[in-house]
Image (cartoon, rainbow, N blue to C red):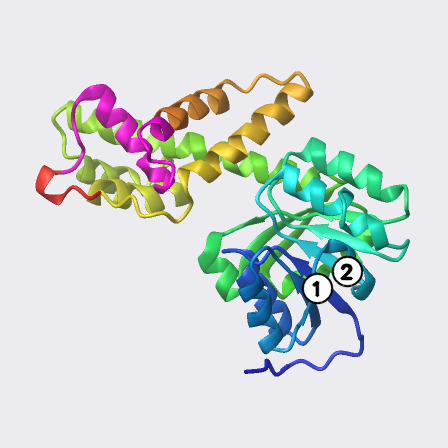
Amino acid sequence: MLFSSTIKRSQTMKIGFIGLGIMGKPMAKNIMKAGYELVVNTHNPKTIQEFVDLGAEGAKNGAEVATKADVIITMLPNSPQVRELCLGEGGILETATDKTVVIDMSSIDPTESKAIAAELAKKGVEMLDCPVSGGEPKAIDGTLSVMCGGTKEIWDKYYDLLMTMAASVVYVGPIGSGNVAKLANQMIVAANIGAVAEALTFAKKAGTDPELVYKAIRGGLAGSTVLDAKAPMMLSGNYKPGFRIKLHVKDLTNALNAAHAINMPVPMTAHMMEVMQELMNHDEGGCDHDDIVRYYERMTGISIIENEKKGE
């Protein structure tokens, strides 16, 4: 079934999209729904064919995408994959021109964003780093939060394109700034979830119902989006992933690397990394990051939920 555009556009811009995984696939579909032409590449041929059936054009690698697209969006797991796609054999730089723009929406190390952008710039290729927050549900409904680094002029030019996938697209600063903002987000989220898990375990060990403690504090200064999202999951023993521990480990690794590159001590981030390493050693990397509560469970020997209600 072909997508039919509900938006008439004066431009004939063709968009390249590379990386059609859990996040990339719905993001790319929202671009098509907005009326843009798309040329796609990903590791799975079946996914490429799925997009061809929807009216997109397939490509064998980044170099071929760069011959057909004005702007190329990448959505990949981490820094090494972005570097290889942009600069490696069969990559974007092989065929890119000084009119090519790369918008990397992966969450990677900002020092790598700067380094990759510098190599692309030698051929006149512009780059934005625009990582996203919101997870798969917001990728599907097109309400992601996007944090952008690069030149303001290029950001302005592609703002409307980015908004086809998002509810919020914010310019943060020069290249690398988008990923700095994303890592700051992940540092705060990790520390907050850790604090929630610790406080609820404290309540239980002190002989007070942790669910009632949650209800008592959520309306005060301790209240937060993290508290309301994760405390009910912890209390019900629900560790089904919205955002997996192993992905948070990836982000904290990048945060630590970027912080150390500027001689910045980040003790809370480092501590949360150690907590998550303990979870990884218990084969819980595929669990939601509310699984941090099980670190406290093992450390204290108690659970904040009744055993008969406890989830896997």
Question: The residue under label 2 is which amino acid type?
Answer: Glu
| Residue at mark 2 | 64
For the N terminus, the image quarter is bottom right
Q: Secondary structure at mark 1?
A: loop
Tell whether 311 sits left or right of 24.
Answer: left
x 23%, y 42%: residue:
215
Q: Which residues are magenta?
A: 279-305
Q: Say if the magenta span includes residue 166.
A: no
Q: Are marks 2 and 1 in contact (CB under 8 Å)?
A: yes
Residue 224 in sight from this viewpoint: no
Q: Height in image: 270 above or below 77?
A: above
| Residues packed near mark 2 inside 10 Å, few (<14), some (14 to 19) or many (20 plus) | many
| Residues packed near mark 1 inside 10 Å, few (<14), some (14 to 19) or many (20 plus) | many
Determine the image quadrant of residue 232. Answer: top left
Query: How far apart are the alpha carbons under marks 2 and 1?
Result: 6 Å
Residue 81, percent across and down? 64, 42
| Residue at mark 1 | 59
Residue 112, percent across and down? 71, 34
Residue extending farthest to the left is 308
**Nearest the eye: 201 or 82:** 82
For the C terminus, the image quarter is top left
